[in-house]
Amino acid sequence: MVKQVGRSPDTMESYRDALTLFRRYVLSDLNISITKFAFAECTRDCIFGFLEYLEAQGNKPGTRNQRLAALKSYLWFASDKDVTLQSIALEVSRVPQCKNPATEKYVLSEDALNAIFGQPANTRMGLRDRTIMILLYVSAVRLAEILNLRVNDICLNEENPYIRVMGKGSKERVVAINIKTVKHVKQYLEVYRSRDNPDTHLLFYTIIKGRAGIMSEGNVERFIQQYADKARETYPDIPPHVYPHMLRRTRATNLYQNGVELALVSRILGHAFLDTTRVYAKPSLAMMREAMDSVEAPQTKDEKPLWVGSEEEMAKLCGLR
């Protein structure tokens, strides 16, 4: 996966998880040891059973489709090594994906964002949390990209501030940030990072047993949810589940609704294909109203009488008394 198709470590972990779950299914539901499980037993019915097993485990359709894609990929890899397995790979490749109905994704309002960003206490930890949340929103980058930022990846020059991130597929991109965000980051560096003087180049970090290391995504997810729960007490419109990607989605939608071209939004987000960005192209009510008002409804033409004459003549012609 690394040398032949250039997959990232995250993708490798995802595929490893899929194959691990498949092994558990084979062992627990089929009662077959993985040492005796042959390719010939990996039939369509077996894969359908695996999908039902995942559903019983609480896996959503999107997750089940991801596990299925990993199995298909592995079987095609095996068939490249042994052509006699191509019929098996072809049979499994025809297993359809689970239906994954599109649901409306939450986008946070400006009031909701301000309410959440205002929750962290005026402490060193609160300063760190607020800086991460603001940087997540303003830059619209992925959480993993934020947590892997190094100090020298961020330019705090007020004339042209930006961050340099390493995205999916090891693709580097530069994302602009605003002056207000620069002030938050500078304050974080002065108050939080300079005091710890950690032995790491990471911009954000955690110290465990005296050693500084990368912060876990779960830690960021946890404190964002906590601040959202607290903000909901005064702003009840905040959705019940708030997570880092919601900040990215909100920023992308706001950019689009404020007139930024979709191609530029796609570049900011680091998408390889424009179609991936279209899910964020959600028009606001004002945009829809403006579009509808821009087209004038056709005027109803004045009807002209088909018959001309007196009332009595018209009645007589129509057979009326």
Image: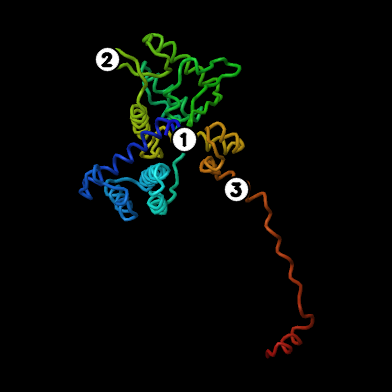
Q: CA distance from mark 2 to mark 3?
A: 57 Å
- Residue at image mark 3: 289
**In the image, 44: left or right of 2?**
left
Which amino acid, by three-letter code, is at mark 2?
Answer: Lys
Give the mark toward the camera: 2 or 3.
Answer: 2
Where residue 209 appears, x then y in whole percent? Answer: 27, 15
1 and 134: which is toward the camera = 1
| Residue 190 against residue 70 in the figure, above or below | above
Q: Residue at x 77, y 80 (%)?
A: 307
The reply to whether callout 3 and callout 1 are in contact (CB within 8 Å) is no
Q: Residue at x 41, y 26 (%)?
A: 118
Where residue 111 appears, x then y in whole percent? Answer: 46, 33
- Quarter of the image with the C terminus is bottom right
Q: Residue at x 43, y 15 (%)?
A: 188
Give the mark toward the camera: 3 or 1.
Answer: 1
- Residue at image mark 1: 5
Q: Give the residue at the far right of this rendering.
A: 308
Q: Secondary structure at mark 3?
A: helix
The label on residue 209 is 2
Which amino acid, by three-letter code, is at mark 3?
Answer: Arg
The label on residue 244 is none
Say few, some or many: other residues with alpha carbon within 10 Å of mark 3 (under 14 / 14 to 19 / 20 or more). Answer: few
Where residue 2 appears, x then y in whole percent? Answer: 43, 31
**In the image, 312: left or right of 124?**
right
Comes first in the chain, label 2 or label 1: 1
Comes first in the chain, label 3 or label 1: 1
Which amino acid, by three-letter code, is at mark 1?
Answer: Val
- Quarter of the image with the N terminus is top left
Comes first in the chain, label 2 or label 3: 2
